């Protein structure tokens, strides 16, 4: 028997559930939802162990002390890695505990705050790289800080204002996990929050792309090329993922609303970690160049006639250092090192 309809669901929810009951039942919805969550956890933990050797070589073994960039990297990396362990209970926990509903509502609330925390850390990392890309421009920093604080306040308003209803009963819970149906009102609020996150991603990508378009006559340097490449990949995937979350809140039945939210959160954290590892890889690889002004490319990339490929040295280290000196905390060498090399070359 499918769980009864919670009393707080409106007529639109009842019509949707009745429409899908003949084919796509509530049990089918729960199964589909849990499959998406299982895929999310596979991506998160598989990618962690896949990139762990690079993290060890490029962060743990780094002679540089803990910086803001590396601190945020570790926070994003392990907040996501450890924070999703209770979330797995949310979807796959089986128990006959009489207080199961109360515990489930606590886990669901925890998951909502975890999403906000991870997105805030990811946003700080994106702000850091964009701020460094613009040479520590105070105007760019002010713009990005206002943007992320607006998104955070808006997110808190959504979470606090759309709290879990007291009308739920144990009969509303599926046999496994803590998945509860989401009303139309709460769905619309959640969709607005993800729309705000999407707007922030658009702002970050626009600033990165503008920096690439307005690059000097020498073309796009190594650091900017990597940031543009990774930023484009991040933006493209996050746009599709965020749109899928927004559409699910608007058009899917109550038990499927927000089914890609965990996946989107995992993808965001995972891709930002890879972005940081790639930039730090440029810093590590530049220690083993074959000439005073050579920078090994880390991937094949062509922009405005500048080609970067693995094993190819590029004589752009001095220009990269002078154009983006403050990216050193993210993945490039310090100005002192560049100055020493330039002096020795002369």
Image: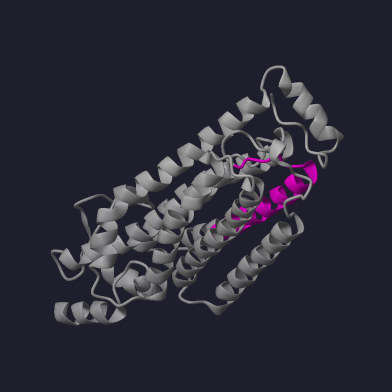
Whether 252 is drawn above or below 89: the answer is above
Relative height, residue 144 to residue 272 (above, below): below
Name the residue located 67 percent from the left edge and 23 percent from the top edge.
25
Q: Is residue 185 inside the magenta stretch? A: yes
The part of the chain drawn in magenta is 178-204
Is 340 situated left or right of 46 in this image?
left
What secondary structure prevails in the magenta region? helix
Instruction: Tell me, yes or no, if residue 220 can be seen here.
Output: no
Q: Is residue 171 left or right of residue 340?
A: right
At a point 46% along the width and 37% down the height, the residue shown is: 39
Location of residue 27 in the rendering, given as x and y in whole percent from the top left corner: 63, 27
Q: Give the mark count.
A: 0
Residue 93 appears in the figure:
yes
Q: Residue most toward the right? A: 11
In front of the other: 315 or 147: 147
159 lies above or below 141: above
The C terminus: image quadrant: bottom left
Above or below, 47 relative to 6: below
Q: Residue furthest left?
A: 290
Q: Residue furthest top?
A: 22
């Amino acid at each position: 028997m499918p769980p009864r309809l919670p009393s707080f669901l409106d007529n639109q929810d009842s019509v949707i559930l009745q429409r899908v009951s003949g084919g796509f039942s509530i049990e089918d919805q729960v199964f589909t939802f849990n499959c998406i969550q299982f895929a999310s956890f596979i991506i998160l933990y598989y990618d962690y162990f896949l990139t762990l050797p690079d993290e060890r070589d490029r962060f743990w073994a780094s002679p540089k002390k803990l910086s803001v960039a590396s601190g945020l990297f570790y926070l994003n990396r392990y907040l996501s890695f450890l924070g999703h362990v209770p979330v797995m209970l949310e979807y796959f926990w089986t128990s006959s505990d009489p207080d199961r509903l109360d515990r489930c509502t606590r886990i669901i609330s925890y998951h909502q705050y975890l999403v906000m925390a991870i997105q805030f850390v990811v946003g700080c990392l994106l702000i850091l790289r964009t701020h460094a890309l613009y040479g520590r421009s105070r105007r760019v920093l002010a713009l990005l800080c206002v943007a992320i604080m607006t998104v955070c306040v808006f997110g808190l308003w959504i979470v606090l204002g759309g709290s879990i209803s007291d009308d739920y009963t144990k009969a509303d819970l599926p046999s496994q996990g803590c998945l509860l149906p989401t009303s139309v009102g709460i769905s619309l609020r959640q969709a607005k929050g993800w729309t705000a996150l999407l707007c922030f991603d658009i702002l970050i990508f626009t600033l990165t792309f503008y920096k690439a378009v307005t690059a000097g006559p020498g073309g796009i340097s190594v650091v900017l090329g990597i940031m543009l490449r990774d930023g484009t990949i991040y933006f493209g995937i996050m746009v599709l993922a965020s749109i899928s979350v927004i559409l699910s809140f608007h058009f899917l039945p109550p038990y499927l609303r927000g089914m890609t939210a965990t996946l989107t959160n995992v993808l965001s954290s995972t891709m930002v970690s890879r972005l940081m590892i790639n930039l730090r890889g440029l810093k590590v690889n530049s220690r083993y160049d074959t000439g005073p002004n050579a920078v090994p490319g880390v991937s094949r990339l062509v922009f405005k006639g500048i080609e970067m490929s693995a094993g190819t040295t590029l004589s752009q280290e001095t220009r990269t250092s002078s154009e983006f000196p403050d990216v050193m905390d993210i993945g490039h060498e310090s100005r002192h090192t560049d100055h020493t090399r330039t002096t020795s070359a002369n």
